[in-house]
Image: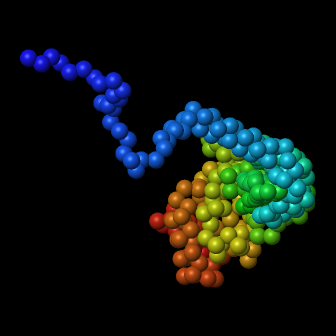
């Protein structure tokens, strides 16, 4: 019986290894993933460093001018001086919140202000001024009061179309309860509810107590308004009464469901 065959001298010991197809090209080396990640990280660091330098270190993005908009009584120069914007500093470093706070503190006439970066070189100051709805005479001058009851400015000449407040409260429970400031706010509330036709002709708002507020019109007529409650309804009733009785000199809408009209 024949024994196992032995390999012949010179035979290929790698005969069991599959041969590469004759058409296959040279073996490709796998890219070094670690090197790729390293290069990407370096590029990101360089890009970030460049951006930081452009924002803070270069002369490209610095404050060169300040623009002011929305002013009425105030001038742009007054606003710009109060803001004290750091011209020449990097635009990105300007503290817009601090600028807004400083403007409101220095210029009480400013109600709101929006500080805006305008790339690449500007800071914009968008101002909204307080509007007076009443005036309080004091020492020959006039204190302006806005729609929130804030006394915000003193002027030497009364602005046109703004009624004068005569706050002469009588000793009463309402004075003890609301105080002078509370009665002032009630007068402001009434001024805000007046119909346009009446508001433009009102020269005085008199307050003697919480529920005793009256108006003096430019043509000599007067209106008893009462308290500031039901203001919208009182405005509608007063408008209707003035249309129905154009020659009447006295109107009472303190009780809007039972108004009264008389010649004097």
Q: Quadrant of residue 1?
A: top left
Q: Position of residue 101 (x, y in %)?
A: 77, 44
Q: Residue at x 68, y 65 (%)?
A: 215
Q: Quadrant of the C terminus?
A: bottom right
Q: Position of residue 195 (x, y in %)?
A: 61, 70
Between 63 and 58, the one nearer to me in the picture: 58
Between 101 and 10, the one nearer to me in the picture: 10
Q: Residue at x 46, y 47 (%)?
A: 25
Q: Position of residue 55 (x, y in %)?
A: 79, 46
Q: Quadrant of residue 189?
A: bottom right
On the picture, is 197 further left or further right than 138?
left
Placement of 198 over or under 7, stated as above or below? below
On the picture, is 216 further left or further right than 173?
right
Q: Residue at x 79, y 63 (%)?
A: 69
Q: Is residue 235 visible?
A: yes
Q: Position of residue 214 (x, y in %)?
A: 66, 62
Q: Residue at x 59, y 55 (%)?
A: 227
Colouring: rainbow
Q: Is residue 107 visible?
A: no
On the picture, is 170 further left or further right than 32?
right
């Amino acid at each position: 019986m024949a024994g196992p065959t032995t390999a012949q001298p010179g035979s290929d010991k790698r005969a069991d290894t599959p041969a590469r197809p004759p058409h296959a090209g040279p073996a490709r080396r796998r890219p070094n993933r670690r090197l790729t990640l390293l290069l990407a990280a370096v590029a990101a660091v360089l890009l970030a460093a460049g951006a930081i330098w452009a924002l803070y270190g270069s002369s490209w993005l610095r404050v060169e001018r300040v623009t002011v908009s929305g002013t009425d009584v105030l001038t742009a120069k007054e606003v710009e001086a109060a803001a004290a914007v750091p011209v020449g500093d990097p635009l990105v470093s300007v503290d817009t919140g601090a600028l807004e706070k400083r403007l409101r503190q220095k210029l009480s006439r400013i109600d709101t202000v929006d500080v805006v970066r305008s790339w690449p070189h500007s800071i914009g100051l968008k101002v909204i001024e307080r509007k007076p709805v009443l005036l309080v005479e004091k020492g020959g001058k006039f204190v302006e009061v806005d729609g929130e009851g804030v006394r915000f400015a003193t002027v030497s000449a009364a602005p046109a179309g703004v009624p004068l407040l005569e706050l002469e409260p009588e000793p009463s429970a309402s004075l003890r309860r609301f105080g002078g400031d509370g009665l002032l706010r009630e007068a402001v509330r009434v001024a805000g509810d007046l119909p346009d036709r009446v508001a433009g002709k009102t020269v005085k708002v008199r307050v003697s107590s919480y529920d005793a507020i009256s108006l003096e019109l430019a043509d000599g007529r007067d209106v008893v308004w009462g308290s500031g409650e039901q203001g919208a309804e009182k405005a509608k009733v007063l408008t209707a009464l003035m249309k129905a009785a154009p020659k009447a000199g006295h109107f009472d809408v303190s009780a809007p469901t039972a108004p009264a009209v008389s010649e004097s």
